[in-house]
Amino acid sequence: MTTDRTTYASEDVSATARSAEPDRPAESATAPLLQVRDLRVRFAQRGRSVHAVNGLSYELAPGRMLAIVGESGSGKSVGVRALMGLLPPSAQVWGSALFDGTELVGMPEREMRRHRGADIAMVFQDPARSLNPTMRIGSQITEAIRAHADIDRGAAQERAVELLRLVRLAAPEQRFFEYPHQLSGGMRQRVMIAIALAAQPRLLIADEATTSLDVTTQAQIMELLLELQQQLGMAVILISHDLGLAASYAQDVIVMYAGRAVEYASASTLFEHVRMPYTRALLGAIPLLEREAHTLLPVIPGQPPDLSSPPVDCPFRPRCASATEQCAEPPPFAEHEPGHWWACWHPTPDEGTHDNAGDGAQR
Ligand SMILES: Nc1ncnc2c1ncn2[C@@H]1O[C@H](COP(=O)(O)OP(=O)(O)O)[C@@H](O)[C@H]1O
Ligand code: SF4
Ligand SMILES: [Mg+2]
C-alpha cells in the first residue's frame, strides 16, 4: 500500500504516468476484477485541453458494488467510458485499467468490442434513447445475446424471455413482442438491464441508471440491481449524483471532484466519519429525511473549477470554508485512516454524526 502523493496541479501527464506508484484506494482481500491506476482523460476542444479526469485510482473486487458520486461534470461518466473505449476521438487517455489482468487503456477498438458487453456492460440514464423504437424488445434482447454467443435464434429467444423474467418484467412472453413505447420508464430500464446482462458480464456499470425514474421505481430498479449482483456474482459500479442512493446500496464510495477522487471509504465509514469538507458539504446540506428519500446532491455555493485551466491549488479551495494558505498546495489523496482515504490539509473533525445513513456493506 502506498501513501505517495498525487499532486492536483496540471503536471506533465507523461511524467506522472512514469511515477512508480500513484495514490490509490485500499487493496481488497479478494483479487480485484478491476484495477484503475492514475487514469487521466483530456479532451482537445477548440484549441484548449479539458482535463476531465485527473489521476483516478481504485479497485473493485468481484461481487462488490462501488458508487462513484459527485456533482455534474466531476468526471464520473468520462472515467468509466474511458474503460470501455466509449470516448470520442478528441479524448486522450493515460494511465492503466486492468480488467482481470488485461489492460483496457489503449486497447484496439476491434479487441475492445469483444470485451464490451461480454465482460463489461453498461446501463445508461435514458432507456428511451438507448432502445431502438422501431424494434420489438424481444428482438433487441435476442440480438444482444446472439452478438456474443453462437446460438440459433430459437435458443436466443428462449434466453431473452428468461432474461425478461430475471429482471422481473411481468408477463415476459407478451412483453417480448412489444415496442419500447408500450412500456413505462421503469419497464424500459428493466429491458436495458436485460440487454446488459445478455452476455453475462462480470462488471456492470450503471451510469445514473435510475436518475430519470420516480423515487418508487428507482428503488425497485436498485433492489433489482442489488439482487442480480448477488445472484450473478457481478461487480457493479454505480454512478450517481444521489448520495442517499450510494449510501443505501453500495459497499464502497468514491467521491469525485474536478476529475479526481477526494474521499474514498466503505459506505458506512464515509457517511459516519466523513472527513473531506466537500463530502461534508454534500452531506450536510441534505436533510436526513430527504436523504432517505434519495434526493439529488444539494447545490453547494460556488462553481467547480474550469477544467480547461485546472487549478494548481486544492480544486475545492474557492468554495471551502476551511481553506488556509496551505491549501495553495494541492493536498495528497492518501489513506489517513485504515480503509479511509481523503485529500485535504484540514479534514473536518470526525464527529460520527451521520450514523443513520444507509450501509451497503451490511447487505
Ligand atoms: N466530448 C467531450 N468533449 C469535451 N469535454 C467533455 C466531453 N465529454 C465530457 N467533457 C467534459 O468532461 C468533464 C467531465 O464530464 P462527465 O464525466 O460527463 O461528468 P459527470 O458524469 O460527472 O457529470 C466535464 O467538464 C465535461 O464538460
Ligand atoms: S481545507 Fe484546504 S485542502 Fe481541504 S478541501 Fe478545503 S481548500 Fe481543500
Ligand atoms: Mg455523467
Image (spheres, rainbow, N blue to C red):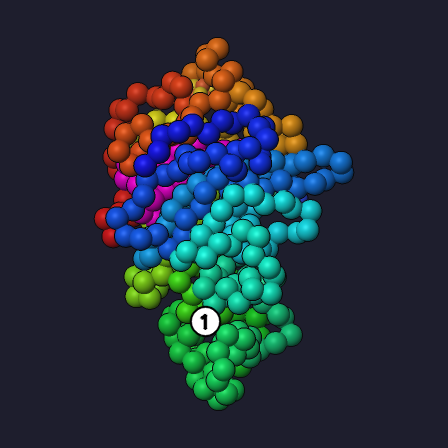
The residue closer to the viewer here, 212 or 66, is: 66
**SS assignment at label 1:** loop
Position of residue 20 measured from the top left corner of the image (x, y, whole percent): 44, 36
Q: Name the residue rendered at 56%, 57% in the picture.
A: 107
Most foreground residue, 234 or 108: 108
71 is higher (above) or lower (below) than 98:
above
Dominant secondary structure of the magenta stretch?
A: strand
Q: Residue at x 32, y 57 (%)?
A: 63
The residue range painted magenta reads 250-269
Residue drawn at x 50%, y 59% as measured from the top left: 122
Q: Examine the rendering and report whether any part of residue 88 can be seen.
A: yes
Determine whether, in the image, residue 64 is placed left or right of residue 173. left
Indicate the position of residue 315 as horizontal and vertical percent values. 52, 25
Q: Does the residue labelled 1 lie within 8 Å of ligand 3?
A: no
Answer with left or right where residue 216 lies relative to residue 90: left
> Quadrant location of the N terminus?
top left
Q: In the displayed structure, would residue 46 be above or below residue 146?
A: above
Queried whether the magenta region covers residue 105, the answer comes back as no
Q: Mark 1 points at which residue?
A: 199
